[in-house]
Amino acid sequence: MNRMEIRTDLALEARESSPGRCEKEEGVKFDESFDEKTGIRVTTVRVLNEAGAAAIGKPVGTYITLEAQSLEQNDEDCHRQVSEQLADHLRGLVGKVLECGQKAVEKTAPRILAVGLGNREVTSDSLGPRVVDELWITGHLESASPKINGIIPGVMAQTGMESARIVRGIVAEMKPGLVIAIDALAARSVSRLGTTIQITDTGIQPGSGVGNHRHSLTGETLGIPVIAIGVPTVVSAAAIVYDTAQALSEMLRRSAGMTDAADWIEEQSPTEQYQLIRELVEPSLGQMMVTPKDIDERVAQLGHTIAEGVNIALLGAEE
Amino acid sequence: MNRMEIRTDLALEARESSPGRCEKEEGVKFDESFDEKTGIRVTTVRVLNEAGAAAIGKPVGTYITLEAQSLEQNDEDCHRQVSEQLADHLRGLVGKVLECGQKAVEKTAPRILAVGLGNREVTSDSLGPRVVDELWITGHLESASPKINGIIPGVMAQTGMESARIVRGIVAEMKPGLVIAIDALAARSVSRLGTTIQITDTGIQPGSGVGNHRHSLTGETLGIPVIAIGVPTVVSAAAIVYDTAQALSEMLRRSAGMTDAADWIEEQSPTEQYQLIRELVEPSLGQMMVTPKDIDERVAQLGHTIAEGVNIALLGAEE
Amino acid sequence: MNRMEIRTDLALEARESSPGRCEKEEGVKFDESFDEKTGIRVTTVRVLNEAGAAAIGKPVGTYITLEAQSLEQNDEDCHRQVSEQLADHLRGLVGKVLECGQKAVEKTAPRILAVGLGNREVTSDSLGPRVVDELWITGHLESASPKINGIIPGVMAQTGMESARIVRGIVAEMKPGLVIAIDALAARSVSRLGTTIQITDTGIQPGSGVGNHRHSLTGETLGIPVIAIGVPTVVSAAAIVYDTAQALSEMLRRSAGMTDAADWIEEQSPTEQYQLIRELVEPSLGQMMVTPKDIDERVAQLGHTIAEGVNIALLGAEE
Amino acid sequence: MNRMEIRTDLALEARESSPGRCEKEEGVKFDESFDEKTGIRVTTVRVLNEAGAAAIGKPVGTYITLEAQSLEQNDEDCHRQVSEQLADHLRGLVGKVLECGQKAVEKTAPRILAVGLGNREVTSDSLGPRVVDELWITGHLESASPKINGIIPGVMAQTGMESARIVRGIVAEMKPGLVIAIDALAARSVSRLGTTIQITDTGIQPGSGVGNHRHSLTGETLGIPVIAIGVPTVVSAAAIVYDTAQALSEMLRRSAGMTDAADWIEEQSPTEQYQLIRELVEPSLGQMMVTPKDIDERVAQLGHTIAEGVNIALLGAEE
């Protein structure tokens, strides 16, 4: 059975689900490092061209992923280390998209608009609003540089508008040089929930985020660079079904030597499997998500960690 | 002593504080009615021209005020009666600004943007956000008419932007035919706190609202009509000082026959009085506000009452 | 494969997971009715003696379950129908435990203590606090009968105390005649999340509830009858794994005719399966829960529905 | 005019309003110190006997008041300095009431119950709940010493019970050696709002607190020592009226030489004044309170500052 086409917003996972295809491609480059002291793993996925984008199913651009199991704990020191790493990588990416060195952020982008996507009233989708709540807002201070603005546009059920259109209107009015969008993401693997942060210069794509944005928020649609910061907070319940099927197939092959049965399971087309399993397991599974038991506390902490990272990157850089 | 120039956002109170001047003017017309059954008093102040505007200190336009002591109570029936009255007057004003009969709202303004001004995190300033939270949002529904959009722009400390600019950007992007802005107001008299609703077609003026907007939100600045709905939730503590001085002066004159002392108090210039009293009473008084003891509950109920009124006016009109 | 011993707080599900055992027993009686008009299914499980308790894994007592798919929708009429049904059954159970007719509630139990168990800060565990927030509290009103008191004791991480001990202290001080405890539950089947309400006269058992109470809250420990009202809001992620394994085993048997493989899967002991699957699927699965995507909204609505039911049962009974 | 009998929960203010009486008494001792570096003023009022209690209108005991204008600002360093001073004085008072040295807290009172009085839903009354939310709770940890428990009992409208009775029930069940109650207070002077912290070993008296407790929470009623920590968050609007009358009387005497009028104002009995002024000023004034404009933010910060002080005093003492 091929790993099913269950949605993931992480480029890291998109690569994992189709390793064969990606390795053959010229268009995707990977880079990984692990810091034993902090326990933070940094993976950079670079999608170089359309061939790479087709192989991995993500647009051309850079995807930096920070993983730290320590984010599960309520340990201030660990969170600060992650904030600082995040600040470093964010500053690097800002420098890159503005085509200037890191020191020149305030000159090239005198105004930055931070956008907290998602729904404040839905715990698993509230990361974006929480981060913007804690940012150092300087947009109204004469002497500040860069000037940071923040907006929490709300979701369509609250506003009747795509958040992308609200942002577009504000961008046209305020003319910032850069948008930084923060959003809660859907992952494929539960081990990534609340332990992974992705930064990318490709912006927000349609269909991404916990709330499934319909429109994109990218350099193309806004006319200025868009950096997106995301943390996976949910996995679809269907993912557990597929993973279990794959695990059972491996069990049958390895432990019981029942190759036929394993083959049969793996040969089922995704659609057949989905239908059968859905029918047999639970018709209501599609409405369900998998989330950490302590999601409320986790989202609050992560909001703080990311806000700190952005604050350091934009305003706290002492070089 | 003249009634001091303490700020009020209510046209009704602006009139009260300068009755002599206004009566002489041709430019201001008043209309008042009281319904004994519901206990709701409706006052309409029409500022007809610049002379009237100068006399009353409020821009040319219509100001409709609903007063109901019953709003103090947690009585669902009373609140519903106020919602219905509010809906009636709002529909009338919408019809007027769109230069069409009441029936034609959905044809002339197929899209209406409701704006919840103020700060959700500050109880006395949270009315606007609370109302927009409870509106029936239809802007994203294909078949709805009129299409209602809602936005809670936040305050400058949160966004680094004037809420007026955020609204301007969204108006340019979404092209609604009408803005309805909801805001908490400052009043002059504590008896009006939480018992009065003002509807006006003049929009939001600089310096108005609990949070003191710096920029206006009017037909002139947005290019489309702006109706504002406001409820006073605070009185400045200084108002109590002035009122007490006036009361004492009357006491000295009436009860003690000490005309000289009364005259002396009244002859003090506002500035002298302010300096003396401030010094004698409390230097920190300027940072203080007067508010009902149950402001938290009161704001929650009023938010519900006004949202219901707007919902009925825009979507619930069966004629 | 036997259905695994995954925890459920619902007597209904305990029965389903061991149908064979229960049917043979004399000690458990079932009763089911379905109202086509309202779409509400009512199942009564009566555990008559220790043999029945052993068979079903739940203490001796009565368990009434209301199931209504309509609870998934935000439809006020459906919720009201459920509130009224809940009120009826609750009144019946109160009458039974106080050994009096329904009319005599206020005479026999002049004081009732409602206890909102769980953690207000954790969405899936916040049902109890939300219900008590909305109850009509009459305990301090001289003329009220019955007198309703309410307490939200908090969870151990917040108070450092078992909620059972807090309740015991208050019961000793206030001497109510009855405790009604409201709690969020763990279910076995995702189709029951947010659509099922269980009322029981057996109180709260150790290990039950989303927050896993360590101590019981029962007639035995408090010295007065305890009625518990619960709604399942989470399913352990492990449940999905087991259900998928069972579904696959059925698929292999039915569709592929691979009886051996199906048998092999079913023959694995629960422990072996758990180890293997956990290892193959996700080591972090144990920290995960499955919950509806709209859990925040669902819990808010259910809190309202149950509060209304309790209010009608205790104070709104017009006979 | 005598300073009117407007309620204050601060012993400091009770002394100020009757300086003549107190100075003559043997039963009240004052002690004041001011630290120029931190800007914190510490005043200790010791009511030594019943004569002192009658003079000052507060029970026999010790009242320590910390005043710092810096608490108005959102400055972390200032708040930490206050937390540390608070910790010092609290530790001293705990040592005194337990009749042991400061080092022996954990031996004499192995269990301490922190009580967050007031109403979480009413901003100006929410200090107690906010503090207990942030305490380090150790009551359930085997090895912790002292064991800290926390309870937020709610207010009578929420529970139907006096919070004093809830606390009494829990004290009987948990048998702590000490209660520390935290509450929002009413002050007489607006300059003290949010800038003053009072610690006392006399517990909570009937009629005190923003929510006006009806029952006391004292060593006498609970059988164990009760230390109360309070911060004034409101002043009654009537206080402004009286202060203004007094200021005007002084103005008439000093600036205008109108001794008769000043005398007349001061000769009015409190009741006459209250009637006249209330009538002339505003009948609804009694329902109003004076509070800082930024009360929401102020209460949040103070909750944090006090929680930190209590945490340091009870668990952070390294000697």
Image (cartoon, coloured by chain):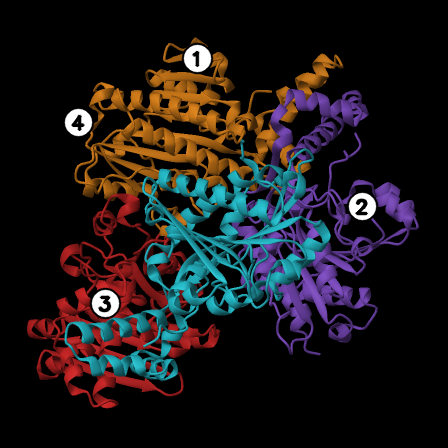
Chain colours: A red, B orange, C cyan, D purple
Identify the image quadrant of the N terminus of chain A: bottom left
**Which of labels 3 and 1 is toward the front?**
3
Residue carrying label 4: B107
- The amino acid pointed to by label 2 is Arg
Tell me if label 3 and label 1 are in contact, CB under 8 Å. Answer: no
What whole-number distance in Å separates the C-alpha atoms at marks 1 and 2?
51 Å
Locate residue B149 relative to residue A309 in the image: left or right. left
Residue carrying label 3: A9
Residue carrying label 2: D15
What whole-number distance in Å separates the C-alpha atoms at marks 3 and 2?
65 Å
Q: Residue at x 67, y 61 (%)?
A: D114
Check chain identity for marks 1 and 2: say if they share one. no
Tell me if label 1 and label 4 are in contact, CB under 8 Å. Answer: no
Residue carrying label 1: B32
- The amino acid pointed to by label 1 is Glu
Tell me if label 4 and label 2 are in contact, CB under 8 Å. Answer: no
**Chain of the residue under label 3:** A
Q: Residue A292: x and y, percent?
A: 39, 68
What whole-number distance in Å separates the C-alpha atoms at marks 1 and 4?
32 Å
Q: Residue at x 74, y 12 (%)?
A: B257
